[in-house]
Image: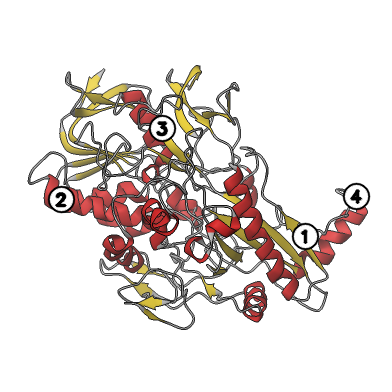
């Protein structure tokens, strides 16, 4: 094994969270090495016309991790044998510099105040016995109000476009009336609504609901952030989510943070460097660095005083299990914390088929462009009356009707042949979706651990996922789907095709890249893997920064709170940990 020169900090994975923390440490004067398992990203790859290649970027998933080298195994319940995930399906983990922040759609929510402390709010409203015993949800250890300044920083740095609905407790027309109090307005006005968004908004308002254009880290106009990073204006060209951005309108680590890092002499990026484990000293209470394999297959030990795990949430959990950081979770005894509280989202919705005189022009759009409403999300719901805990964001997304994948036809249409082709042509311009993105509570039976049978290309046990939807989430998603149907019918459409929540989780079809939990945050070391600064309770010079920290899932995309927590963690490391290494209190 080759041993390299020791550095102050090593960052494992250079996506959103890794780049945010690395930038803060570099600015503090630390010598930082970032290890990225994939390759670099060339801006020419995302320029016209080669950028608009649906076959390359969607069907062949060239921006995603190579499953032949590293994948996971899956089963619905612990009585089953888990099998390897051979093809990209339910979720898409990015590869290369920028990680999933390169191919994401740009949706940048603040999670609702309830999402940060559900246990406390549930018990105050319904009593301590209301939460089912097998539901292992818990509070974050940091409230929405405490995280608000960091949400604001994310929005300012990333050129987020949107409309505030609540500034310092004052409700603002046109925004989300159910959001938590904000300290100020967005830096950019909302993106321009598409025809389908206007149709959904009109129908929703006729029912007394409160639709608004969702916030997105896609600049609606030319914008320069406080660091001097310049954004172009969105082109609404339809190839956005799962693609890079040719107009530099969509925020990504590559165009937002990386230019600030690569100009510094105390920062080094090593691509094609796959970390195998975090090395610990004999006490198992301190990390000494990481071992990784480079592009030539050489095993290299990188000594470091500080280890930042930012290898996507699932990757962070895998590395902690492989490295012996924290006690693995045991679903039978309930002991242990690493692998606990893996959660996902449960979804449903409708497709609205309009008359031929209503043209939706579905091709025009961008990844984060959507008309949304929170009228049926968490605290707006009476959980006792409805029979479930949680809620959903309901939205009509207008992210581009790509020609290979977008072929909506009404129920009863043949699945192939001349009649199917005619139906595709007939309905392409006259349909739109309304979807319910439902949250997911955590359960004792849903967890991550190491597979005892299957190993990856490097000889390591694969990460094993044991997960299925609970009846609570199915009820919640079906309730949200019913509301989608109400809105769809309010358009006057003759056909509203319903897609109810699945009875069982299937890892094959794409759903969302919103995996959470497995190394969760909290205030009790016996119930959480990391503290509210995402610092390992057991190995204090290791920080696990990612969606692995969320103790349960929400009915919103996770990138906004994930980034806000990363900014908060980076600030705490620089201004508190470095002055007094040890657990940050």
Q: Gap in Å between the C-alphas at discs 1 and 4?
A: 21 Å
Q: Gap in Å between the C-alphas at discs 2 and 4?
A: 62 Å
Q: Nearer the viewer, residue 159 or 337?
A: 337
The answer, for residue 80, to whether it is visible in the render is yes
Q: Nearer the viewer, residue 127 or 246?
A: 127
Q: Gap in Å between the C-alphas at discs 3 and 1?
A: 38 Å
From the image, state whether disc 1 or disc 4 is nearer to you: 1
**Secondary element at tag 3:** loop
Is disc 3 in contact with disc 4, using a CB cutoff of under 8 Å?
A: no
Is disc 2 in contact with disc 4, using a CB cutoff of under 8 Å?
A: no
From the image, state whether disc 3 or disc 2 is nearer to you: 3
Is disc 3 in contact with disc 1, using a CB cutoff of under 8 Å?
A: no
Picture coordinates of residue 480, whole percent (x, y): 62, 60
Q: Of marks 3 and 4, which one's residue comes earlier in the chain?
A: 3
Q: Gap in Å between the C-alphas at discs 3 and 4?
A: 47 Å
**Secondary element at tag 1:** strand
**Residue designated by label 3:** 339
Q: Of marks 2 and 4, which one's residue comes earlier in the chain?
A: 4
**Residue designated by label 4:** 417
Q: Considering the image in quadrants, where does the N terminus appear?
A: top left
**Residue designated by label 1:** 497
**Residue designated by label 2:** 574
From the image, state whether disc 2 or disc 1 is nearer to you: 1
540 left or right, relative to 338: left
Is disc 2 in contact with disc 1, using a CB cutoff of under 8 Å?
A: no
Q: Of marks 2 and 1, which one's residue comes earlier in the chain?
A: 1
């Amino acid at each position: 094994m080759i041993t390299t020169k020791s550095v102050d900090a090593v960052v494992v994975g250079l996506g959103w969270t890794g780049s945010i923390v690395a930038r803060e440490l570099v600015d503090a004067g630390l010598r930082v090495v970032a290890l990225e398992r994939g390759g670099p990203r060339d801006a020419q790859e995302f320029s016209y016309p080669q950028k608009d290649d649906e076959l390359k970027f969607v069907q062949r998933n060239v921006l995603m991790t190579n499953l032949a080298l590293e994948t996971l195994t899956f089963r619905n319940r612990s009585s089953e044998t888990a099998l390897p995930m051979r093809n990209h399906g339910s979720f898409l983990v990015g590869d290369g510099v920028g990680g999933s922040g390169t191919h994401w759609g740009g949706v940048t929510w603040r999670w609702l105040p309830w999402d940060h402390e559900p246990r406390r709010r549930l018990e105050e409203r319904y009593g301590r016995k209301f939460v089912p015993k097998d539901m292992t949800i818990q509070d974050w250890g940091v409230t929405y109000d405490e995280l608000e300044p960091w949400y604001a920083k994310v929005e300012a740095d990333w050129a987020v476009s949107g409309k505030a609905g609540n500034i310092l407790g004052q409700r603002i027309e046109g925004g989300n009336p159910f959001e938590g109090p904000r300290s100020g307005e967005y830096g950019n006005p909302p993106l321009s609504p598409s025809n389908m968004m206007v149709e959904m908004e009109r129908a929703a308002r006729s029912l007394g609901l409160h639709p608004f254009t969702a916030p997105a880290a896609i600049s609606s106009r030319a914008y320069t952030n406080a660091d001097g990073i310049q954004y172009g204006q969105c082109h609404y060209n339809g190839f956005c989510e799962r693609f890079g951005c040719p107009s530099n309108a969509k925020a990504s680590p590559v165009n937002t943070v990386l230019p600030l890092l690569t100009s510094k002499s105390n920062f080094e990026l090593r691509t094609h460097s796959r970390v195998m484990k975090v090395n610990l000293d004999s006490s198992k209470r301190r990390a000494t660095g990481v071992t990784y394999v480079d592009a030539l297959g050489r095993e290299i030990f990188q000594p470091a005083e500080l280890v930042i795990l930012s290898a996507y949430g699932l990757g962070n959990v895998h590395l902690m299990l492989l490295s012996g950081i924290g006690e693995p979770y045991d679903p039978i005894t309930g002991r242990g914390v690493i692998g606990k509280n893996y959660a996902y989202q449960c979804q449903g919705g409708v497709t609205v088929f309009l008359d031929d005189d209503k043209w939706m022009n579905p091709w025009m759009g961008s990844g984060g462009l959507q008309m949304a409403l929170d009228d049926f999300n968490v605290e707006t719901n009476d959980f006792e009356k409805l029979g479930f805990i949680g809620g959903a964001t309901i939205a009509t997304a207008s992210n581009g009707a790509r020609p290979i994948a977008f072929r909506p036809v009404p129920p009863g249409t043949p699945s192939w042949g001349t009649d199917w082709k005619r139906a595709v042509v007939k309905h392409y311009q006259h349909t739109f979706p309304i979807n319910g993105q439902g949250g997911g509570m955590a359960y004792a039976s849903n967890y991550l651990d190491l597979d005892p049978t299957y190993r990856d290309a490097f000889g390591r046990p694969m990460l094993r996922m044991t997960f299925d939807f609970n009846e609570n989430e199915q009820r919640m998603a079906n309730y949200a789907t019913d509301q989608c149907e109400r809105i769809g019918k309010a358009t006057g459409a003759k056909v509203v095709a319903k897609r109810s929540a699945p009875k069982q989780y299937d890892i094959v079809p794409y759903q969302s890249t919103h995996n959470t939990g497995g190394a969760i945050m909290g205030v009790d070391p016996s119930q959480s893997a990391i503290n509210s600064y995402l610092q390992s309770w057991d190995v204090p010079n290791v920080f696990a920064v990612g969606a692995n920290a969320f103790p349960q899932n929400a009915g919103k995309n996770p990138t906004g709170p994930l980034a806000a927590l990363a900014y908060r963690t980076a600030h705490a490391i620089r201004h508190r940990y470095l002055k007094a290494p040890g657990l940050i209190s």
